[in-house]
Amino acid sequence: MDLREYFERTKGTGVLATADSSGKVDAAIYARPHFLEDGTMGFIMPDRLTHHNLQSNPYVAYLFIESQGLHQGKRLFLKKVSEEKNSERLKKMRRSCLCDEEKESDGKDRYLVIFKLEKELPLVGS
C-alpha cells in the first residue's frame, strides 16, 4: 500500500515537528497530509510557530500514530520545497467542516506548504 492509500484508509493522530534556525524545537498536532499529483505532499497551516520555523529550516518530521493497534504508524522525514499563501488549490483541499463563508471570512492567512519525502520509517523500530 502506498502512502496516499495508507493515509486515505488509516485513522489516527499526526504530529508535525519543526525547529528554527537555532535548533529550538516545536511540535504541533496536524491532520493527515494532502497528496499532490507530482508525488509531493502538503500540509495546510496558519501563520504560527510551525510556519515561522519553516522559513529558516525546511526540514520536518511527521509522526502518525494509528488509532487502532498498539504503537503502529509512520514516521516521515520531509523537506519543504515550496508554499502557497491563500491559493485556490489550498481552498479546494481544506477538509475543515466549516462552511465556505466561515473559511473565507475569518481573515487569517493560510499556507499550503509542500514537502518532498526524504525518508519513511515505521512508528516503532528502524
Image (cartoon, grey):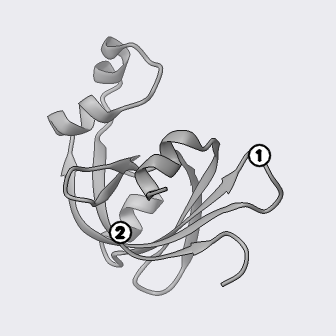
One can see residue 32 in this view: no
From this view, report whether residue 118 is shown above or below residue 11: below
Q: CA distance from mark 1 to mark 2?
A: 31 Å
SS state under label 1 = loop
From this view, report whether residue 125 is shown above or below residue 112: below
Tell me the crowding category of disc 2: few under 14, some 14 to 19, or many 20 or more residues within 10 angstroms, Cα based. some
Q: Position of residue 45 (x, y in %)?
A: 39, 48
Q: In the picture, which quadrant includes the C terminus? A: bottom right
Tell me the crowding category of disc 1: few under 14, some 14 to 19, or many 20 or more residues within 10 angstroms, Cα based. few
The residue lying furthest to the left in this view is: 88
From this view, report whether residue 44 is shown above or below residue 101: below
**Amino acid on which the number 2 mark rests in the picture:** Leu
Q: Position of residue 125 (x, y in %)?
A: 72, 80
Judged left or right of residue 119, residue 106 is: left
One can see residue 124 in this view: yes
The numbered dot on residue 43 is none
Of tags 1 and 2, which is closer to the observer?
A: 1
The residue that appears at 25% across and 31% down in the rendered structure is 91
The residue that appears at 38% across and 59% down in the rendered structure is 51
Judged left or right of residue 21, residue 76 is: right
Q: Position of residue 124 (x, y in %)?
A: 73, 74
Q: Earlier in the sequence, mark 1 or mark 2?
A: 2
**Amino acid on which the number 1 mark rests in the picture:** Gln
Exactly how many numbered labels are in the figure?
2
SS state under label 2 = helix
Q: Viewer-proximal residue, 52 or 95? A: 95
Q: Which residue is mark 2?
A: 54
Q: Which residue is mark 1?
A: 68
Judged left or right of residue 19, residue 113 is: left
The residue that appears at 69% across and 51% down in the rendered structure is 66
